[in-house]
Image (cartoon, coloured by chain):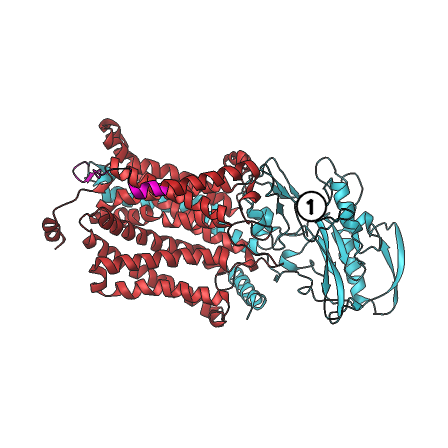
Chain colours: A cyan, B red
């Protein structure tokens, strides 16, 4: 038994306990009505990292320089200055693209913009908010106290705190829609989707992207498909390519309540570094527990009443109060 | 009142006191570096481990070690066992200092500490957040502890009128002093639920997290009372309060039994027992932690063990380690955020925590030597008689 197996069984029983009415269990949150998102198709990614550079340019982030390699960005993982990064999976002789054995594949890491975001649930000061219309998980630096609970609550380890700055802040992808940038509000798409030459990162509404993903799942491997680039609802261009052997799994359709940034690939997602998640979000469980205990502060009030009565009784007739 | 408690008439500046001061200075130096150059300059925190020992020791474990006042208040005021009252002031002082350390730890670990007040602005509060509950509740409890301890200060400065007025409402403060730790200690457990899959299955008990957290807070609270009282009598060569402590031993046996029953019940019910024998770090830590819980249970089960000062002390030490390890394991040691992240505290990080603990002990020593905190020492003979 490992973390994965445990989660399958225990989340099942937790869901059962919850539906049995143990607590006023809160179900997973639902996708925002006009949620926007992205679809990353690992089989289309050629690892050029144009998206990493575009992301940094658009968001005004400095390149990650390692050693004397000044000519390119050496970002290997998410960091305060890196909201989006391309990782590589390799196995054996690494000859075949998108092959689990003796192959390699690319995977994008960036904020998944969860439908039921852990970071939003655990933040004590409402610094992280899920936009009710677009579903984008936004960050308010003026509210943030830097407690970093969001980082513990994120199943994907996405939010990054700038430890090297004495007045540091949290950094993560806000779909290029943060104050001062607001690309989505201005009818543009995210920097990474705009830059992607193969359409591996596709922009659009969650609904349209999910339809596109399902369409690709249904394609026959080997047949030619006309892949769109840019915005799936109004592609800037297309390119024809033979369909790979997709895994019948759209990451983010259901995982922990689903995500607005979804992934498809021909390699199992745990190999690509995705976490072991069931369908129920962990924060829906912790919020159920918390709201059962603190519903209208009724339980604490009753307990305080009882405690006060007991303490009063046990210290009565003792003119020194609690001092005897 | 003054006939029950008295200050220890001893020198404040002793060799141990000076040594503690040196540790404190090193800690304060690195704390200065943290505020000037950022947390990265002194800690090993990273994207997968946003919480290191400043959170997990100073707050999660430290406040549990500061539950002596809480555990004793429940015993004295809720279960009406007035005979334990002589231990109360020392326990309250330790609680106040421990929670003070927790509060301080929270501030120094806060990446944007200058905005901490957002926690107290109603329009900024997120009522879904367990962290909000912990923050508000711990802040309130520190104030409650200050009020609960204030009679000692008033007595020292002979503010009798003020003390009489406080005594009229003290019952309300005491009731709050029982409610608040129950709330935030359980929430420290609830916090683990949201961390989800990163928490090792042996410690991810989902709905049971708050209950196990409160139970360990209690066991650690009682253990620290026994430990403190034993050390005070050894360190200051005072008459031991063994007759009082052995009674606490009985309560401890009950608490550990309930805790182990729930802990193992959950593990067996969810079919995770094989993980305890997997031979990896998680199983090793689980075995050590369980052994540390079982040892005091075995020792204190027999009246002989409970009435022997030495075995009581060892049982208390074991239980303190058990509860601390339970929380360290869940929050840090067996935590695995994946993606190759790992964490071990840096030397400066450890020194900051040790420095703060040193300051805590120094203040404790100073206060018991200048304020009426410890119970008045009786003659050994008279003591033995009253115990019988």
Q: Nearer the viewer, residue B206 or A266?
A: A266
Mark 1 closeness class: few <14, some 14–19, many ≥20 residues within 10 Å: many
- In this rendering, would B101 be left or right of B159? right
Residue A316 position within the rendered picture, expressed as x and y whole percent measured from the top left = 22, 40
Q: Is residue B13 magenta?
A: yes
Q: Chain of mark 1?
A: A
Q: Can residue A301 be seen in the rendering of this structure?
A: no
Residue A269 position within the rendered picture, expressed as x and y whole percent measured from the top left = 69, 64
> Is B170 drawn above or below residue B187 in the view shown?
above
- In this rendering, would A159 be left or right of B144? right
Residue A61 position within the rendered picture, expressed as x and y whole percent measured from the top left = 72, 41
Main SS of the magenta part reads: loop
Residue B23 position within the rendered picture, expressed as x and y whole percent measured from the top left = 40, 43
- In this rendering, would A146 be left or right of B259? right
Q: Quadrant of the N terminus of chain B?
A: top left
Residue at the image point whose x is 48% and y is 61% from the top: B203
Residue numbers of the magenta segment: B1-20
At mark 1, the secondary structure is: loop
Residue with the mark numbered 1: A136
Q: Nearer the viewer, residue A165 or B204?
A: A165
Q: Is residue A22 magenta?
A: no
Residue at the image point whose x is 24% and y is 28% from the top: B157
> Is B254 drawn above or below residue A203 in the view shown?
below
Q: Quadrant of the C terminus of chain B?
A: bottom left
């Amino acid at each position: 038994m490992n973390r994965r197996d445990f989660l399958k069984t225990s989340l099942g029983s937790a869901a059962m306990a919850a539906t049995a009415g143990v607590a006023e269990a809160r179900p997973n949150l639902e996708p925002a009505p006009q949620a926007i998102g992205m679809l990353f198709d690992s089989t289309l990614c050629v690892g050029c990292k144009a998206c990493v550079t575009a992301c940094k340019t658009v968001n005004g982030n400095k390149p990650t320089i390692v050693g004397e390699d000044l000519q390119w960005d050496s970002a290997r993982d998410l960091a305060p200055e890196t909201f989006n990064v391309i990782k590589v999976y390799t196995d054996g002789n690494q000859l075949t693209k998108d092959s689990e054995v003796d192959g390699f594949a690319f995977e994008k890491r960036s904020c998944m913009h969860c439908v039921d975001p852990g970071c939003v649930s655990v933040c004590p000061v409402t610094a992280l908010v899920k936009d009710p219309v677009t579903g984008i998980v936004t960050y308010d630096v003026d509210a943030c106290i830097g407690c970093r609970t969001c980082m513990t609550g994120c199943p994907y380890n996405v939010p990054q705190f700038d430890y090297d700055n004495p007045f540091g802040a949290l950094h993560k992808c806000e779909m290029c829609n943060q104050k001062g940038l607001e690309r989505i509000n201005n009818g543009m798409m995210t920097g990474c989707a705009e830059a992607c030459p193969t359409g591996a990162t596709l922009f659009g509404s969650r609904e349209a992207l999910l339809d596109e993903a399902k369409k690709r799942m249904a394609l026959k491997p080997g047949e030619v498909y006309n892949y769109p680039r840019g915005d799936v609802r109004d592609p800037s261009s297309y390119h024809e390519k033979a369909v790979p052997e997709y895994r019948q799994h759209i990451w983010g359709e259901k995982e922990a309540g689903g995500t607005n940034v979804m992934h498809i690939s021909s390699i199992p997602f745990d190999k690509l570094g995705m976490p072991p998640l069931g369908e129920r979000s962990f924060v829906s469980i912790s919020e159920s527990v918390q709201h059962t205990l603190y519903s209208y502060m009724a339980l604490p009030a009753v307990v305080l009443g009882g405690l006060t009565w007991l303490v009063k009784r046990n210290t009565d007739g003792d003119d020194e109060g609690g001092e005897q | 009142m003054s006939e029950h408690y008295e200050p220890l008439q001893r020198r404040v500046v002793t060799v141990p006191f000076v040594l503690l001061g040196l540790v404190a200075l090193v800690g304060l130096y690195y704390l200065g570096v943290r505020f000037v150059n950022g947390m990265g300059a002194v800690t090993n925190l990273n994207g997968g481990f946003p919480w290191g020992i400043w959170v997990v020791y100073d707050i999660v474990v430290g406040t549990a070690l500061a539950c002596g006042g809480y555990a004793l208040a429940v015993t004295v005021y809720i279960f009406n066992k007035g005979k334990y009252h002589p231990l109360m002031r020392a326990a309250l002082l330790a609680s106040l200092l421990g929670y003070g350390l927790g509060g301080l730890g929270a501030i120094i670990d806060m990446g944007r500490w200058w905005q901490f007040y957002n926690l107290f602005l109603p329009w900024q509060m997120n009522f879904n957040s367990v962290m909000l509950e912990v923050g508000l509740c711990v802040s309130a409890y520190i104030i409650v502890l200050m009020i609960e301890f204030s009679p000692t200060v008033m007595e020292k400065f002979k503010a009798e009128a003020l003390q009489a007025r406080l005594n009229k409402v003290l019952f309300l403060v005491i009731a709050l002093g029982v409610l608040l730790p129950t709330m935030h200690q359980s929430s420290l457990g609830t916090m683990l639920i949201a961390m989800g899959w990163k928490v090792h299955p042996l410690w991810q008990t989902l709905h049971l997290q708050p209950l196990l957290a409160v139970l360990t807070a209690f066991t650690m609270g009682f253990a620290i009372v026994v430990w403190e009282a034993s050390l005070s009598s050894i360190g200051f060569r005072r008459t031991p309060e063994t007759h009082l402590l052995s009674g606490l031993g009985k309560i401890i046996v009950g608490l550990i039994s309930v805790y182990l029953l729930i802990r193992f019940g959950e593990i067996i019910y969810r079919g995770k027992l094989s993980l305890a024998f997997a031979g990896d770090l998680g199983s090793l830590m689980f075995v050590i932690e369980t052994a540390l819980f079982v040892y005091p249970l075995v020792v204190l089960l027999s009246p002989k063990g409970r009435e022997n000062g030495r075995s009581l002390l060892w049982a208390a030490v074991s239980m303190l380690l058990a509860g601390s390890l339970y929380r360290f394991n869940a929050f840090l040691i067996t935590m695995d955020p994946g993606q190759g992240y790992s964490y071990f505290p840096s030397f400066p990080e450890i020194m900051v925590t040790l420095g703060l603990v040193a300051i805590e002990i120094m203040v404790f020593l100073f206060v018991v030597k200048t304020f009426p905190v410890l119970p008045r020492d009786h003659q050994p003979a008279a003591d033995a008689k009253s115990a019988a």
